[in-house]
Image: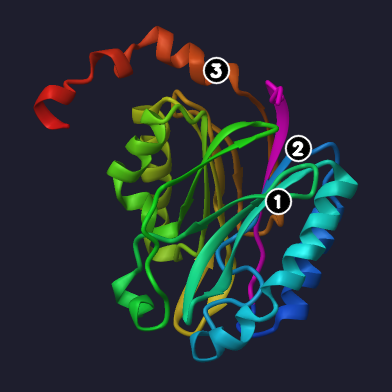
Amino acid sequence: MNPKKEFKAAVVQFDIVNGQIEANMGKALEILGGLSKVSLAVLPELFASGFDNEHIKEHARHTPKILDRLSAVALEKNMALAGSLPEDHEGKIFNTLYFIDRDGKVKGAYRKLHLFPLTLEHEYYGAGDQVMIVDTTIGRVGLMICYDLRFPEQARKIFLEDAQMILVSAQWPAPRIAQWEILARARAVENQLFMVCSNRTGTDRELNFSGNSLIVDPMGKVLARAEESRSSMTAVINMEEADRAGRLIPCREDRRGDIYG
């Protein structure tokens, strides 16, 4: 595999209606269909079903067909896709971020490690038990979901396993949107990699979502920010910049693992 060094990436965002799979998929496919010469697109957390928790097991039955539809899009457009969907595994439902490569094949499936207690996710979903890094046609990529962004240890493990980019699929509410950007930029800087972070718009019960999906470079510069009115934003990514950042400031070599692990 010879990964692309430079390519265009996109973050996708829209108002997800709980339980309306066909309507949500229609929005997602319309946005993806309008992207031009994009090699990677990241969709929001539970973009097909939303947090329709009371019916999430039923929604999980649709996930294999949704993956088939996305795989066809990926192959047709030569575009890697990532986004989270409910996964039914051994009687438990997981919030799982799938990575579909440009050849239409699912290369990774990451189960959310950190379940958000304020919305009682632990009552409906199982927690994952491993960090996920995937070797892909665009490079070595780590996968995270929403609340995971608050845990620097997870991003650091991805960095230590030589990833050049982290993808984040999220439903991050508007009242805490400043923290969303701060954390995404911090994870980029401290781990010297790209962050491609997709967040939803619209409302879910009492929660409002303002988008602000982000693409951040390894020095913390925001390459793209999608305002609430936008359905997508793109930026050109050069994966060699992650290596250059490491050479400029040798954080990996200067870590004191003997002191703090």
Task: Describe the colour scheme in one phrase.
Answer: rainbow
* Residue at the image position 12 percent from the left and 23 percent from the top: 258
- Comparing marks 1 and 3, which lies closer to the viewer? 3
Residue found at the very far front of the displayed protein? 90
Label 3 sits on a secondary structure element that is: helix
Task: Identify the residue under disc 2.
Answer: 39
Q: How much space separates mark 2 and mark 3, taking CA atoms?
A: 17 Å
**Residue shown at the point (36%, 58%) measured from the top left:** 129
Q: Is residue 106 magenta?
A: no
Looking at the image, the residue that sits furthest to the top is: 248
Residue 97, horizontal then vertical, whole percent: 55, 58
- Which residues fall within the magenta stretch? 1-16
Seen in the image, is 228 located left or right of residue 76?
A: left
In the image, 103 versus 179, the foreground residue is 103
- 65 up-or-down from 154: above or below: below
**Where is 167 relative to 138, above or below?**
below
Whether the magenta-drawn stretch holds residue 12 is answered as yes
Q: Which numbered tag is attached to residue 241?
A: 3
Residue type, mark 2 in image: Ser
Q: Quadrant of the C terminus?
A: top left
Residue 50 position in % (x across, y down): 58, 76
Q: Label 2: how many residues lie within 10 Å, few (<14), some (14-19) or many (20+)? A: many
Say which amino acid is labelled 3. Glu
Q: Residue at x 36, y 44 (%)?
A: 183
**Mark 1 to mark 3: distance in Å?**
23 Å
Q: Quadrant of the N terminus?
A: top right
Q: Residue at x 79, y 49 (%)?
A: 104
* Residue corresponding to mark 1: 232
Up/down of 2 relative to 226, above or below: above
Measured in 3D between alpha carbons, the distance from the residue under mark 2 to the one under mark 1, in whole angstroms, is: 14 Å
